[in-house]
Image (tube, rainbow, N blue to C red):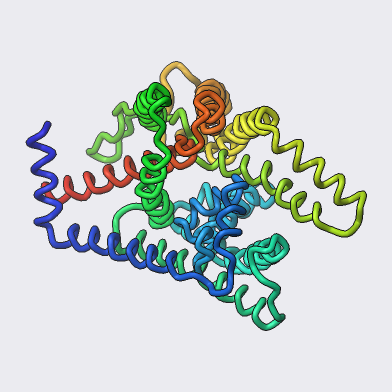
Amino acid sequence: MFETFIRKIRLVFEDETLRTRILFVLGALVVFRLLAAIPIPGINAAELAAFVNQSQFFGLLNLFSGGGFSNFSIVMLGVSPYITASIVMQLMTILIPTLKQMYQEEGDAGRQRFMQYSRYLTIPLSFVQAFGFLLLLQQNGVVPQLSTLAFFTNIFVIAAGSMLVMWIGELISEFGVGNGVSLIIFAGIVARIPSDIARTIFSFDIAQVPAYLGFAIAAIVITAGVVYITEAERPIPVTYARRVRGMKVLGGISTYLPLRVNQAGVIPIIFALSFLLFPQMIATFLSKVSITWLAVGAQAVVSFLANQWVYGSLYFLLVFVFTYFYTAITFEPHQVAKNLQKNGAFIPGVRPGQTTADYLGNIITRITLVGALFLGLLAVLPIALQGVTGITAITIGGTALLIVVSVVLDLVKKIDAQTSIREY
């Protein structure tokens, strides 16, 4: 095992094409980190840091921008508009059958067109988000009152920065290794680790050593659980019917159809955060208006959602529901059954057609229960750890942990596939 690992590492550095791809990824991530460090002038840094720390929504946005939001950098939105556009396009497949057919039935060409539409949608969303966030930050005193020209100039700079990050992600996907957008989010998460460790060391309390040890053990166990659930799948046996064409006998082989336990990935957590925290952001904005009854009602909403038990319960419920919702969008049992029948394949003991679709639907419903519970517990994990240990300096971010593990596993698989091709 160790010798195989060393051989593959040596092959990575010896192969010029693979080495170039990896160096391109590293160079692109360095450029992204440099952009995240270029601030837009004229902000109150202390007010901005306090504002980001008190809101989990802006904390997640800061996570996706690699710390760019807390620096009020030119890429402060990161890949957030692109993620929003992708989510909107996925939801539109329910309302527009043409988009659903393009995404599920037209193969790679259809998915490429679908992703192109997502990029087009990212442009107006970048301007809308830049306008909304800049207005909100200005209202909270983070950004001083700007002239009309300066206000719209900043909007164009922020929107252009977001599209630049999206372009860098696309370049990584095309000329590098792995998914570019995922690697940008991964780089933003990893870049925060040194500062988090330093903050933990400076706030170290000898009386909380048992809590720190418990946290370390929990981190190892949870990471192992994330890896296990991320890789877990239910294999469905599939047999291809034997066909005779001329002098050749085709088919007659047996394989399996892998159904992943966590079919939806990290998307349900992002869905849930958007639905839960966007009203909170709107209520925060309305709580400062001059209309008394509207401000009082908005402040009541903010106070209600600020309760950790209420927030945690709603968060878990939304993640659970959206896991089933997104799985239903991405996995269509009827389409899978149709494709199997079209290719002369069948599940042993199950009739082709509607019976196969019902069989696959029942299985995906049962295994999604495990995935939904897992994602829900992972989402509320930071809240639970803060409540149990009382340590606010360190928490295991469920979303961040899931993204990091998923990206690392995907990257290792793709590099391993590249090295295997070159070995053969």
Does 100 sit left or right of 178 as displayed? Answer: right
Does 27 sit left or right of 262 as displayed? Answer: left
Q: Residue at x 46, y 28 (%)?
A: 261
Instruction: Specify the farthest residue to the front.
Output: 206
Q: Is residue 267 above or below residue 58?
A: above
Image quarter in which the N terminus is found = top left
**Which percent across, then down, holds residue 41?**
54, 74
Instruction: Specify the farthest residue to the bottom.
Output: 149
Does 341 sit left or right of 297 as displayed? Answer: left
Q: Is residue 58 above or below residue 119?
A: above
Q: Residue at x 30, y 47 (%)?
A: 411
**Which percent across, then down, holds residue 107?**
45, 52
| Quarter-of-image position of residue 320 | top right
Residue 236 is at least partly visible in this image: no
Q: Residue at x 39, y 42 (%)?
A: 202
**Which percent across, then down, holds residue 72?**
53, 65
Work out whether residue 406 or residue 240 is closer to the camera in this orientation and state it: 406
